Amino acid sequence: MAGPEMSEAEYLREVEARSRAVVNEAADEGWLAYYEEVEETNGLRRAVNELARTLRHYHYQGDGCLDEETDRPRMRLAGVVLLRPAAMPFGMDDDYETACRRLNVDPRPEGWAVWNTWSRQGHPVLLVMTDLDGTEGLLINWAKGISTYPVTPVPSQIAQVHEGWAAPMTVSPRVRSHLGVDGLPLGAESMRDLQGLAGDNQRESDD
């Protein structure tokens, strides 16, 4: 019996999930090598090791793996916020319409993504983004402790730019390790501690 018809994105996710299952089995058997070339290994093991290197993070739109994205620098994010009419972040007092009004965007049905980052001078800046799918993929990686960051968005993905940050936000693994907090949304009172990380996030690379 044929399975349900999948979209291209769903098909790619299914391929990735099955590939990860192969890599996980190799890791459980104790012979997986991400970086070392083991001379005595056979062709199958070499292929699985190469597959593991490709799957170092869960792929998402804007992760820098596509040829057209390789020349775009990485964004250094303190955290992100997803705003949706029926699913506002835990701890946010505003409803969806009020939050959109504060950000000076229309309350569109699909919602908005907010990226909290730093300016070149180290000041907190937020970008109101249309890239919901990419932000969701980013959060999947962060939830698993994978420190990955998206490439710089193209202008058409940015609806607004504002000084300051949106709260509560889900913080990146790097921020989480600096502050010793979990990945749950971080409130405004805790975000003051992030100001000192601006220099670190601009100087250090996560790649």
Image (tube, grey):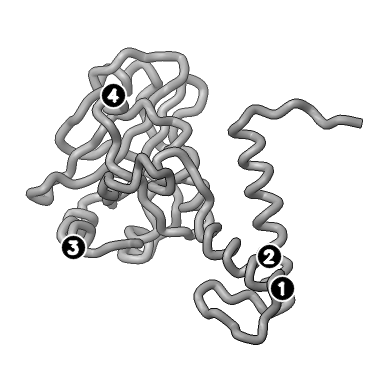
Of residues 88 and 175, the one nearer the viewer is 175
- 143 lies above or below 113: below
Quarter assignment of residue 105: top left
Q: Is residue 11 left or right of residue 94?
A: right
SS at circle 4: helix
Q: Is residue 107 left or right of residue 5?
A: left
Residue type beneath disc 4: Ser
Comes first in the chain, label 3 or label 2: 2
Of residues 107 and 14, the one nearer the viewer is 14
**C-alpha span from label 4 to label 1:** 44 Å
Comes first in the chain, label 4 or label 3: 4
Q: Residues within 10 Å of mark 1 (few under 14, many from 20)?
A: few
Estimate the x, y position of residue 187 in percent, counting from the top left. 33, 45
Q: Residue at x 39, y 21 (%)?
A: 95
**C-alpha span from label 2 to label 4:** 38 Å
Residue type beneath disc 2: Asn
Can you identify the residue that label 2 sits on? 24
Estimate the x, y position of residue 169 in percent, counting from the top left. 36, 42
Q: Residue at x 54, y 72 (%)?
A: 34
Can you identify the residue that label 1 sits on? 28
SS at circle 2: helix
Q: Are marks 4 and 1 in contact (CB under 8 Å)?
A: no
**C-alpha span from label 1 to label 2:** 6 Å
Q: Are marks 1 and 2 in contact (CB under 8 Å)?
A: yes
